[in-house]
Amino acid sequence: MEGGGMYMGGGVAVASGGVPLIQKAPGGRSGAAAKGQRCSCGSSVLRAVRVRCCGVFAVPPPKHRLLALVLLATGAYCILVHLQLLHQAPPLPLAFISSHGNRTRNLAAVRDNLSSASNHRVSDEGSDHSLSLFGGGPASRGGGEVEEEMARRRALVWEVCRTSGLVSDDGVSKVEPNAWEFFVDEHHHLVWCNIFKAASSSWMYNFNLLGGYKEQYLRRSRKSPLALARERFPRPSVDQLKAALPHSLSFLIVRDPFERLLSAYRNKIEGFRHKFYRKMAREMISKFRFKTSPAPGTHRSLNNEKSPTFSEFVSWVIESANNAKGVKDGGYSGIPGFDEHWAPYYRFCTPCAVNFSVVAKMETLARDEAYIIQKSGIGAALGRKFGGGDLSSRPREAVNAAIGARTEDVLPRYFQTLNKEQIDALYDIYKIDFLMFGYDVSKYYNMLPS
């Protein structure tokens, strides 16, 4: 056995210095065996390359030596992997960056965190595993590409916060978090800002499952999913949100701002589908019917549509937003000038005051949801049917889509009824959302009739 300090020579175990370790007895058997004695040390057995037995070192059989070599090689490999993981850094730490001087958040810190921050580890209560929110290891089955994409999205959010003047020169948010719209699940270390018309019904259903409701109860309950969820996850205060964020995975889900606006119109306004919005719809008709110019190449029906047109709805949104300029956001009053279903993301979820762990998008929703579920360890709590696309097993209220074709497929049909001035005014309202989350407005100008 070269390099191991021992070799076999002429049937005798010999040390590297030439001194026999086991003397061969007459007849070819070694000392203890020649006398018929059993070589043992109590109840122990030969387990290593060299085992002290009956006062001497015995050489184990070849199969034991092979096993020992395999174990040593496996151990060395595990050590190398562990050392490699220790040097991996997360894209950003999961830390809440509060406003008004508690913890500042600036661009230099973001860049430092991208390269040198240490992993933030969270134990999921009630389970036997440790969750690595960022970085490598078993919790990163989503792959490095998803981690890198999430890092880019967070960096873009912060860059727009800085360039849009939403933070001070020293990197402090100029507003408090809009805690009113957050869900905080302390048991699962999960924080969600609920943006309506962006997978909100699905995640409301998920949070009801996390809150302990059974699927059978959710199907037959007459209460709205939001009311049920708030019974288990009351609206947090700003201080409660700040306390939960440092040890939670926080996320929001966004989509193209104008696509969301059209989805809200189709679901809440068009056809008077929703009782709550009928009064608002009638006000839109009263104020803007025949008082706005249709887009070139289009005409307005003379038979008075039963519900507001998309152009009338857009005019209402623009005027309401302009009338509410300068009014303070947040709290029980909501976002001044906006319904919750079309309020701008940057005001509704205040991402310049909250450093979200995950910025998910509708365009990559399946992948992003899988990432959130895997990172937070809530797969078992949500059940096997989650993500399977089987909406028939969920309560009717959880499937809250507009009737007819998908919104993204009918965008041209609706936006070609607008004029350039309306798109300009809409973009002025939602410009920060477009920039902050990487969306392009140019396609909507291309939809205008020539």
Image (cartoon, rainbow, N blue to C red):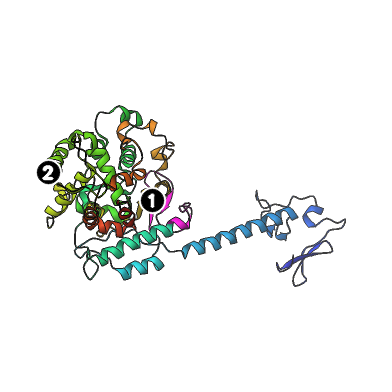
Quadrant of residue 215 within the rendered picture: top left
Question: Is residue 195 among what the camera can see?
Answer: no
Q: Farthest residue to the right: give it.
A: 27
Residue at screen point 74% across, 59% down: 59
The residue where tag 2 is placed is 287
10 Å neighbourhood of mark 1: few (<14), some, or many (≥20)? some
Q: Amino acid at mark 1?
A: Ser
Q: Amino acid at mark 2?
A: Lys
The residue where tag 1 is placed is 123
Q: Looking at the image, tell me whether mark 2 or mark 1 is earlier in sequence order.
A: 1
Residue at screen point 20% across, 36% down: 307
Quadrant of the drawing holding the N terminus: bottom right
Residues at marks 2 and 1, CA–CA distance in whole angstroms: 55 Å
Secondary structure under badge 2? Answer: helix
Residue at screen point 26% across, 63% down: 161
- The magenta segment is 120-146
Residue 212: image tag:
none
Residue at screen point 71% across, 69% down: 3
Q: Closer to the camera, 10 or 296?
A: 296
Q: Considering the whole magenta stretch, tell me its main secondary structure.
A: loop
Question: Is residue 429 among what the camera can see?
Answer: yes
Q: Is residue 235 above or below residue 242?
A: above
The x and y percentages for residue 35 are: 80, 52
The x and y percentages for residue 419 are: 24, 52
Does 253 sit left or right of 274 as displayed?
right
Q: Closer to the camera, 150 or 45?
A: 150
